Image (tube, rainbow, N blue to C red):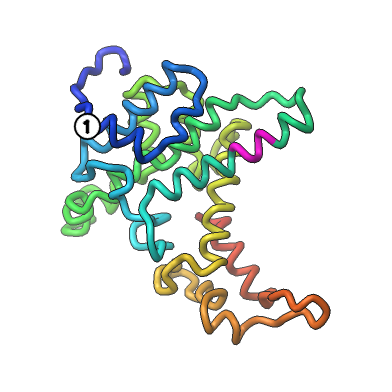
């Protein structure tokens, strides 16, 4: 933990984190591995959630809601995609300097602040009077960086938590953060584009994103007469990509 900060974390919380996020075992550095466990246990301990898997599978509260599965599926998926990226470069370009442990830890912790932002009691308090402290007062990337630093995780991991989202557009992202950021965006694009997201939970700014799903997707799409592959009409796909650029 950060110097001067002390807290007691239950073994049950720690065990649940290890069970929900088994990729933690892929972190070679033992100290970093245990601090990832502590960070998640600390984050959960401040909320009504007791397991990572109990957190709803959403990009933001009420937005891009998975049809099934919790936050653990997203965290593990992003981490596995990120590992695929760095393993490719390690194999093809051994000289590429990418910190594997930081990428794995960052992938597992990039949404660590969601326990706070998604907590039902917090949501109730904030919505009761947003004029008092905001709604939310702090988004999950910033709160996540706070948790990472309290738990004694390296700056590089806290940076990934803080900057994997649009907050990172205001700074220069580290290489490891770029890897996790791109994996995160790719995961949500694939999930949304393949019909895994509830159609009524696309961003209110652009409901046209729903056009790429279900029966509506078929109406607004074409198939290549040569290959038979599905081709989403350019206008719909461009709006879909634009949404991810802004979030």
Q: Secondary structure at mark 1?
A: helix
Up/down of 92 relative to 131, above or below? above
Q: Which residue is mark 1?
A: 12
Instruction: Decide if residue 131 is in sight here.
Output: no
Q: Residues within 10 Å of mark 1 (few under 14, many from 20)?
A: few
Residue occupying the far top of the picture: 3
Up/down of 99 relative to 76, above or below? above
Residue 153, position as x, y percentages in the image: 41, 22
Q: Position of 46 compared to 188: left or right?
A: left
Residue at 18% in and 56% down: 124
Residue at 45% in and 66% down: 197
Q: Quadrant of the N terminus?
A: top left
Q: Quadrant of residue 48?
A: top left
Up/down of 70 relative to 39, above or below? below
Residue occupying the far bottom of the picture: 219
Residue 203, position as x, y percentages in the image: 44, 66
Q: Position of 232 compared to 46: left or right?
A: right
- Report the magenta residues as a range: 83-87
Q: Quadrant of residue 140?
A: top left
Taking the magenta stretch, the answer to whether it contains residue 241 is no
Q: Position of 87 compared to 93: left or right?
A: left
Residue at 36% in and 53% down: 70
Q: Quadrant of residue 30?
A: top left
**Of helix, strand and loop, which mostly describes the magenta segment?**
helix
Pick the residue in front: 218 or 155: 218
Pick the residue in front: 5 or 199: 199
Instruction: Decide if residue 64 is in sight here.
Output: yes
Pick the residue in front: 152 or 198: 198
Residue 14, position as x, y percentages in the image: 28, 30
Residue at 61% in and 62% down: 241
Residue 208, position as x, y percentages in the image: 52, 76
């Amino acid at each position: 933990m950060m110097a001067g900060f002390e807290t007691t974390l239950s073994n049950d919380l720690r065990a649940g984190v290890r069970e929900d996020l088994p990729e933690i075992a892929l972190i070679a550095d033992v100290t970093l591995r245990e601090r990832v466990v502590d960070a998640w246990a600390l984050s959960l301990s401040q909320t009504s959630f007791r397991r990572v898997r109990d957190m709803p599978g959403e990009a933001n509260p009420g937005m891009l809601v998975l049809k099934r599965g919790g936050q653990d599926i997203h965290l593990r998926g992003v981490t596995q995609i990120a590992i695929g990226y760095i393993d490719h470069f390690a194999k093809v370009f051994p000289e590429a300097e990418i910190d594997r442990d930081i990428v794995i830890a960052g992938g597992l912790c990039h949404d660590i602040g969601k326990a706070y932002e998604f907590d039902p009691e917090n949501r109730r308090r904030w919505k009761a009077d947003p004029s008092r402290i905001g709604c939310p007062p702090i988004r999950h990337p910033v709160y996540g960086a706070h948790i990472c630093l309290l738990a004694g995780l390296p700056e590089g991991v806290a940076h990934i938590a803080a900057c994997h989202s649009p907050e990172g557009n205001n700074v220069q992202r580290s290489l490891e953060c770029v890897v996790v950021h791109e994996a995160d965006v790719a995961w949500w694009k694939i999930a949304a584009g393949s019909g895994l997201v509830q159609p009524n939970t696309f961003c209110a700014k652009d409901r046209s994103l729903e056009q790429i799903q279900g029966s509506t997707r078929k109406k607004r799409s074409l198939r290549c007469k040569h290959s038979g592959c599905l081709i989403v009409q350019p206008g719909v796909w461009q709006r879909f990509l634009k949404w991810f650029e802004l979030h």
